[in-house]
């Protein structure tokens, strides 16, 4: 099964609309469920505790990162040193460089 998307048939997440000629809602739901099942095997979802949010504010001042980048990096750094091996994954080369400078193992899927 493959997903085909054209600019005029872009689904809206809020309205739940989709182009029935492209993929059914049921197939979309199945694909998303499969993606999340697989992702949860390889990734950790970190609750945004207040300490992580505060740490992300400190990173904004130190590294001049965008808000979501800060939250991602702060969560990874909060896990680093726990019993979990942390590998920071991002396609943003600048963010990967900052994570690496802070001692995290990194992967950039874009190369």
Image (cartoon, helix red, strand yellow):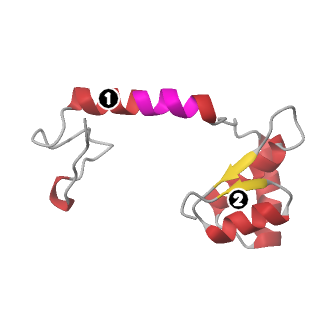
Residue at the spot 44% in from the left edge and 33% down from the top edge: 35
**Mark linked to residue 29:** 1
Residue 85 percent coordinates (x, y): 80, 39
Q: Is residue 51 visible?
A: no
Residue at the spot 64% in from the left edge and 66% down from the top edge: 66
Query: Which of 82/69 is in front?
Result: 82
Q: Residues within 10 Å of mark 2 (few under 14, many from 20)?
A: many
Q: Residues within 10 Å of mark 1 (few under 14, many from 20)?
A: few
Q: Is residue 86 magenta?
A: no
Q: Using residue 49 as the reference point, say whether residue 1 is left or right of it.
A: left
Residue at the spot 27% in from the left edge and 47% down from the top edge: 12
Picture quadrant where residue 94 is located: bottom right
Q: Secondary structure at mark 2?
A: helix
Q: Using residue 15 as the reference point, say whether residue 107 is left or right of it.
A: right
Q: Main secondary structure of the magenta part?
A: helix
Given this view, does label 2 or label 1 mark the residue nearer the observer?
1
Query: Which of 20/17 is in front?
Result: 20
Q: Is residue 39 magenta?
A: yes
Picture quadrant where residue 26 is located: top left
Farthest residue, direction front: 111
Q: Secondary structure at mark 1?
A: helix
Give the alpha-carbon distance from disc 2 to disc 1, as whole Å.
30 Å
Residue 48 percent coordinates (x, y): 70, 40
Residue 59 percent coordinates (x, y): 79, 63
Query: Which of 14/102 is in front?
Result: 102
Query: Which of 75/83 is in front?
Result: 83
**Mark linked to residue 70:** 2
Please give the range of residues in magenta: 34-40
């Amino acid at each position: 099964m493959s997903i085909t998307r054209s600019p005029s048939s872009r689904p809206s997440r809020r309205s739940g609309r989709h182009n029935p000629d492209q993929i059914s809602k049921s197939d979309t739901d199945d694909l998303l469920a499969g993606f999340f099942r697989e992702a949860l095997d390889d990734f950790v979802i970190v609750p945004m505790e207040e300490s992580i949010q505060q740490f992300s504010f400190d990173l904004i001042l130190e590294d001049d990162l965008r808000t979501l980048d800060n939250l991602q990096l702060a969560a990874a750094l909060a896990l680093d040193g726990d019993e979990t091996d942390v590998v920071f994954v991002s396609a943003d080369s600048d963010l990967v460089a900052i994570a690496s400078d802070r001692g995290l193992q990194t992967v950039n899927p874009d190369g």
